[in-house]
Image (tube, helix red, strand yellow):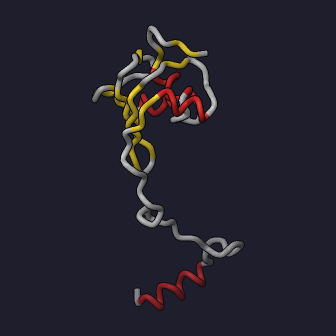
Amino acid sequence: MAEDEGSVRVDSWIWSVRLAKTRSAAAAACRAGHVRVNGERVKPAHTLRTGDEVRVRQPGWERIVVVTRLLRKRVGAAVATECFVDNSPPRPPREVMPALPQRERGAGRPTKRERRETDRLRGL
């Protein structure tokens, strides 16, 4: 299960320690430039070693972790937290993130008539 010597693919390790939900999502993040190892953008097949700093950009914040143990297979959350040192800044509070406007359930899109009334009220 664990391999303490050698190297592991960065996409596989990110998936193994639960920084990404799937390995394909981890590989896609690498291809999109959201993963940096020791300050450099990397491809999914980049080899990772103990002591490397991995930065994974996620929506709204960035995870910064230092590798302490190499894994090839996915492990439980308790074991995964022992495999890296988390140096990430705290997550921003939910109020800071912009909220999406919501419509009443079942309201759907406005009709053409409702749109004209809204425009008339706005003075357009």
Q: What's the residue at 36%, 47% (across, down)?
A: 89
**Residue furthest out toward the left:** 39
Quarter residue 122 falls in: bottom left
Horizontal side of residue 102 vs 70, given as left or right: right
Camera-nearest residue between 116 and 50: 50
Q: What's the residue at 53%, 19% (across, down)?
A: 71
Quarter residue 123 falls in: bottom left
Camera-nearest residue between 13 and 41: 13
Classify the position of the C terminus by image quarter.
bottom left
- The spot of residue 12 in percent (x, y) is 52, 22
- The spot of residue 45 in percent (x, y) is 44, 17
Quarter residue 39 falls in: top left
Q: What's the residue at 40%, 51% (across, down)?
A: 90
- The spot of residue 110 in percent (x, y) is 60, 76
Horizontal side of residue 108 vs 70, given as left or right: right
Classify the position of the N terminus by image quarter.
top right
Image height of 13 relative to 94, above or below: above
Horizontal side of residue 29 vs 52, given as left or right: right
